[in-house]
Amino acid sequence: MSAEKDIKEKFREFLNVYWIRPEHSFLSTYDYAVLRDIFPLPKPNIDLACGDGLTSFIWAGGKFDFSFDMYHSVKDTDVMYSDDVDVYDCFEKDFCKPAIVKQPDWNYTYGLDLKKSMLEKAKKLNFYENTINHSFDDPIPLEKKFNSAFSTSLFAFTSDADVLSNRIKNVNKILNLNGKLVMRLHERTFKQMLFHNYYKQYGFKWAKKLDKFIYDHNPDEKFDLAWWVEVLKNNGFEINNIHNVVPRLVAYAYLIGFRPMFRTFMSMYNMLSLEQRTELKKQWIPDLVELFEELMFEETVTKIDPDSKNVLYLIEATKIKEI
């Protein structure tokens, strides 16, 4: 299969699961354009901050029936703008039965996450041979060592330099010598483009509402690529590749997305039967594909925004010494 066809197919798979918040599919598809040449990761392997496992499941080649999506188990959408609430941090057993039509081509030995409810969802996929509910900031209590570790969010949701460095150190401790680490980082200008900056500068309440705590949960601009390279080296890693992914225009689309309408969309979602939702998806997803598929290719974005720069990194590193 050609790269273009593969990426388009993956975009549709993400839309099937994230159809109400399709912006999630943007970042996942751009990541996949790089990860398709990195995966599968050598076993034993571990997915750090794996969440509900859906994104990793699809990256690995898994597919779901049209009747399934990630919104079967959502809470507190009525307060999602007034409190620091993760609406997905819940588990309802009766609504978490993924309709899998194709198992992934490979899987993970372990999935680790801070939130027990997310791991309960992940277990339903039979994609992780083992799961562990554990803080990212404490040594991982496993005697087993891994040949590879992966994470897209473990190094994103704090601005504490000591915490970030400690997380790298903890990853070193669970990898075998010559073990591989694949991680996603935000480029330093990512925080500069967040809508919260308009709230800080002008007091715009709409900008604060759109931000939904993204600003507070992202590393400061001081953590540039040179800082990360130094921290990795100081914690026993050698950089193999640095991939610059996700154009600025696509990141803006992600940061707005359908977030403002999510509460209303979920109200409609819950009013419909499964059969009605499934029929609606069959109309909705082709429209989303027609609107956004071309934006999943950087050459299209460059024509629209010639000065665009990419705002996320995917880094491949190898553990070269114990610490």
Image (cartoon, helix red, strand yellow):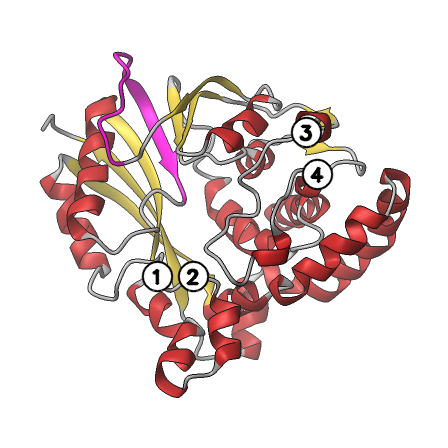
| Residue 156 located within the stretch drawn in magenta | no
* Label 3 neighbour load within 10 Å: few <14, some 14-19, many 20+: some
Residue 216 - label: 1
Q: Is residue 79 left or right of residue 51?
A: right
Q: Amino acid at mark 3?
A: Cys
Residue located 41% across and 36% down the image: 49
Considering only vertical position in the picture, is 60 above or below 32? Answer: above
Residues rendered magenta in the picture: 137-152
On the image, numbered disc 3 is attached to which residue?
A: 96
Find out whether the residues at labels 1 and 2 contact each other: C-beta distance under 8 Å. yes
Compare marks 1 and 4 and give the one earlier in the sequence: 4
* Residue at numbered disc 2: 213
The kind of residue tagged 2 is Phe
Which labelled disc corresponds to residue 193?
Answer: none
Residue 301, image x and y in percent? 55, 70
Q: CA distance from mark 4 to mark 2?
A: 24 Å
On screen, residue 95 above or below 85: above
Closer-to-camera residue (211/98):
211
Contact between marks 2 and 3 (CB within 8 A): the answer is no
150 magenta-colored:
yes
Residue located beneath label 4 in the image: 72
Q: Where residue 319 sits in the image (x, y, percent)? A: 20, 30
Q: CA distance from mark 3 to mark 4?
A: 6 Å
Name the side, left or right, on which 177 lies relative to 151: left
Helix, strand or loop for the magenta stretch, by majority: loop
The disc, 3 or 1, on the residue closer to the chain's N-terminal end is: 3
Q: Secondary structure at mark 4?
A: helix
